[in-house]
């Protein structure tokens, strides 16, 4: 029996967050113990409703969801509805969930669970780092209690995707990111655009998922959340930013890292830029086995193999 890793997912669901949730609920080496939500791609109310709906869609309605921060630490919230659509799920209209939220709010849930199970839980952040920064502020012992943190964020040696230098999750809350990257976590891995832009599903995947009626919900979810990107925006690829962070949490061999000290620009000129300024304890992913990562995602969620080009 594969030893399972206990994971808390902190999300701003969002289309690729939804795919990351699907991956986490299906992978045999993952025990998804809770999901916390944060304002990012969409406002936190919609991100929370989307997360509940996605978990119900996946038949994982037993996993508790805890609503988190409604805005960044300092700045006004800026969303990404231009890519994830006005509801945040890329055109998907999943049945709304009827179930209750977890009793405590996102940062409190992270603290409670890490305190109850010191050294066991991996926190995977796939949105702005507001919840983690708040939790760290309230309970600095999180640094010892969390087994590891794997975050999707940053553009370290490549251009950004919101400005020429900033990646979205960091751009939305650079002050939170600054606090997280400067905290002395023994195991903090940053999965930035340096690697996530190389891990994508393609139009062939989109065509395959639309021509196979007999798919598990974890695969047909792509047919729902991919509509906006593949039809309205007419994209030919869909980067698996957030699913890659989850995959690395249970298989670090997918990426090669550099040991780094990371600084986050909060000045207006290059707000949200993440720079490696020297050696340090942050593991910044710089290379990825992209084919193996995409194949792991396809196999785990049950995607049909795309027809060869
Ligand atoms: O830059 C990509 C990241 O920003 C992903 O987490 C995506 O969901 C958005 O939040
Ligand atoms: Ca996200």
Image (cartoon, helix red, strand yellow):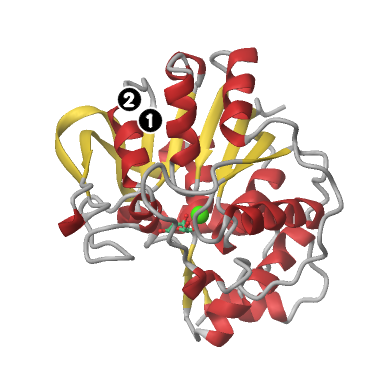
Q: Is residue 168 shown above or below 246?
A: below
Q: Quadrant of residue 45?
A: bottom right
Quick check: marks 2 and 1 in contact, CB under 8 Å? Answer: yes
Residue at coordinates 54% horizontally, 48% vertically from top-left?
Answer: 70
Looking at the rendered structure, the number of numbered marks drawn on it comes to: 2
Q: Is residue 302 shown above or below 288?
A: below
Query: Ligand 1 within 8 A of label 1's CB?
Result: no
Lower sequence index among marks 2 and 1: 2
Residue at coordinates 56% horizontally, 31% vertically from top-left?
Answer: 107
Q: Position of residue 207 (x, y in %)?
A: 63, 81
**Residue 299 seen in the figure:** no
Q: Position of residue 138 (x, y in %)?
A: 48, 21
Instruction: Identify the residue position indicated by label 1 in the image.
Output: 188
Q: Position of residue 241 (x, y in %)?
A: 46, 56
Quote the CA–CA distance across marks 2 and 1. Answer: 9 Å
Instruction: Identify the residue position indicated by label 2 in the image.
Output: 183
């Amino acid at each position: 029996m594969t030893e399972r890793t206990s994971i808390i997912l902190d999300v701003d669901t969002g289309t690729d967050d939804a795919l990351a949730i699907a991956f986490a609920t299906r992978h045999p080496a993952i025990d998804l113990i809770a999901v916390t939500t944060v304002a990012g791609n969409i406002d936190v109310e919609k991100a929370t409703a989307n997360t509940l709906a996605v978990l119900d869609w996946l038949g994982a309605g037993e996993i508790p969801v805890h609503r988190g921060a409604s805005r960044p630490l300092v700045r006004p919230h800026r969303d990404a509805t231009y890519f994830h659509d006005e509801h945040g799920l890329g055109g998907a209209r999943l049945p709304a969930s009827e179930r209750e939220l977890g009793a405590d709010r996102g940062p409190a849930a992270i603290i409670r669970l890490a305190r109850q199970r010191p050294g066991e839980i991996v926190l995977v952040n796939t949105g702005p780092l507001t919840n983690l920064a708040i939790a760290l502020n309230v309970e600095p012992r999180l640094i010892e209690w969390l087994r590891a943190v794997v975050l999707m964020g940053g553009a370290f040696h490549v251009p950004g995707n919101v400005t020429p230098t900033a990646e979205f999750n960091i751009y939305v809350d650079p002050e939170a990111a600054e606090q997280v990257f400067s905290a002395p976590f023994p195991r903090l891995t940053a999965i930035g655009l340096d690697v996530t832009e190389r891990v994508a599903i393609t139009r062939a995947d989109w065509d395959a998922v639309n021509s196979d009626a007999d798919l598990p919900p974890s695969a047909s979810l792509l047919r729902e959340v991919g509509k906006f990107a593949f039809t309205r925006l007419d994209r030919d690829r869909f980067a698996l930013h957030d699913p890659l962070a989850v995959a690395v949490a249970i298989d670090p061999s997918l990426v090669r890292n550099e040991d780094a000290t990371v600084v986050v620009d909060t000045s207006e000129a290059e707000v949200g830029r993440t720079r490696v300024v020297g050696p340090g304890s942050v593991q910044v992913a710089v290379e990825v086995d992209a084919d193996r990562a995409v194949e792991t995602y396809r196999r785990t969620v049950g995607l049909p193999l795309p027809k060869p080009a």
